[in-house]
Image (tube, helix red, strand yellow):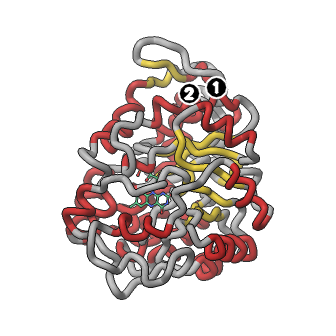
Amino acid sequence: MTSLDATPPRLLDLAEMEERARESLGEMAYAYYSGGAEHERLIEENVTAWSRWQLHPRVLFDVSSVSTRSTVLGSPVSMPILIAPTALHRMAHPDGELATARAASDAGAAMVLSSLATADLDDVAQAAPDGVRLMQVYILKDRGRTAEMVRRAAAAGYRALVFTVDVPVSGLRTREVEQGVRLPDRFALPNLTDPAAGHGSGWGFMAQVVKEFDPALTVDDIEWLAGLSGLPVVVKGLCRGDDALRCAEAGAASVVVSNHGGRQLDDAPPTALSLPEVVDAVGDRMEVYVDGGIRRAGDVMKALALGAHGVLIGRPVLWALATGGADGVRELLGSFGEELARVMALCGAVDVAGIDGSLVRSVDGHPGERR
Ligand SMILES: Cc1cc2nc3c(=O)[nH]c(=O)nc-3n(C[C@H](O)[C@H](O)[C@H](O)COP(=O)(O)O)c2cc1C
C-alpha cells in the first residue's frame, strides 16, 4: 500500500529539471534528447493534449488505503508507469542504463531497455536482477543480428519484446541534423547494431543507424519475432484502432499507442487523442499502453481512465538521469507514484482496477471511453 503521509509532498518541476539537464548535457546531447521531427509541433501537442481531458472525481468512497500496484503482462509492479525505451543513456550519465535499471528496480517499476542502449543487455540485467525488464527491438535487414539479440534478451530474463514499428525510415530530426548529432567515440551500441554504428558524422544519429533497419516490415513479422524466443511481443508505435486489431490478430500480446515522442511524423495525432480509438478497437483482447507527453500523475490517471493498462515516460527520465543519476530517476519515479496515489484518492479510486471511464471527461463534456 502507498501511504500518502510517508514523505513531505513535493510537486515535481520538470521544466526546471530539464533546464538543469541542459546545462550538464551540453547542446548536442540536449538536442538529441529533447528534439523531434520537422517543426517539432507534436512534442508540445503530446503534452497539451492531455489537458483536453479532465478528471471527473467521485467522492465519499473510503480511500484510507490506496494502492498503485499493477502488473505488466502479468509481472507485478508497484505502479502502472514504465520507463520508455530511450537510446544512449551514457550520454546523460556515466552509469547510463545501469543507473536507470537500478532506479526502476528499486522503485518497483518496469523498464524497457532500448536496443540502442549504450550498455550491454546482460550488464543491465545484472545491475538490477530483480527488476521487471522488457527489451525493445528494431528488426534489422540483417535478421540474424536481431535474432541473436532476442535470444540473449530471453536468456537474460527480459519478460517481453517491445517491437517498435514507427521507424521504417527516420523522421526528419531537424535538430539532430543541425547539430550533427553523433555517438561520441567513447560509447558503443553493444546490443543490436554494428558496434561502430552511430559514430559517423552526417545527418544525425538516427539517420545513420536507421540504414540498418528493415523498412519492409509487415504484421507477419510479429509472428517471426515471437517465434524466436516465445517471449510476448508488444507492438510499439501505432495510433490507429485498425492497426492495433491487425497486430492482435497477428499474435501481438499488447500494443503501445505512441508517436515516438514526436520524433517521427510531426503531423500525427497526439497520443492522448489516439488512445480511445485503440482501446475501442481491441477491447479486452490485450493490454494497451500509451506514451507521449505524460508529465504528471494526473496524465497517468487520465490515460488509465481512458482504458490504458499503463503508461511509459521518456524524456523526464533522461532529465532525471542527467541531473541525478540513479538517485534522480528513483526520485522521479517515487514522486510519480506518490502523486498518482494522491490523485487516485482524490478521485475515489483505491486501486488501479477501480479506475474506470467514468473518471474522465473531455473538456467538451464527452464522457471517457469504456474501459
Ligand atoms: C532521446 C530519445 C530516444 C528514444 N529512443 C527510442 C528507442 O531507442 N526505441 C524506441 O522504441 N523509442 C525510442 N524513443 C521514444 C520513446 O520510447 C517514447 O515513445 C517517447 O519518448 C515518449 O514520449 P515522451 O518523451 O514525451 O515521454 C526515444 C525517445 C527519445 C526522447
Q: In the rendered view, does 193 fall on the left or right side of 89?
A: right
Q: Which kind of residue does numbered mark 2 sit on?
A: Pro
For residue 59, which quarter of the picture? top right
Instruction: Label 2, secondary structure: give it.
Output: helix
Relative depth, front residue between 182 and 85: 182
Q: In the rendered view, does 17 fall on the left or right side of 206?
A: left
Q: Is residue 79 above or below residue 45?
A: below
Mark sitting on residue 30: none
Q: CA distance from mark 1 to mark 2?
A: 6 Å
Q: Which residue is mark 1?
A: 280
Q: Are marks 1 and 2 in contact (CB under 8 Å)?
A: yes
Q: Which residue is mark 2?
A: 276
Residue sticking out furthest to the bottom: 186
The residue shown at (46%, 12%) is 365
The residue carrying mark 2 has its beta carbon less than 8 Å from ligand 1: no
In x, y percent, where is residue 337? 53, 49
For residue 67, which quarter of the picture? top right
In x, y percent, where is residue 275? 54, 32
- Dot 1 surroundings within 10 Å: few (below 14), some, or many (20 or more)? some
Note whether residue 77 is visible. yes
Note whether residue 10 is visible. no
Q: Which kind of residue does numbered mark 1 sit on?
A: Asp
Relative depth, front residue between 358 and 61: 358
Q: Is residue 18 above or below residue 345?
A: below
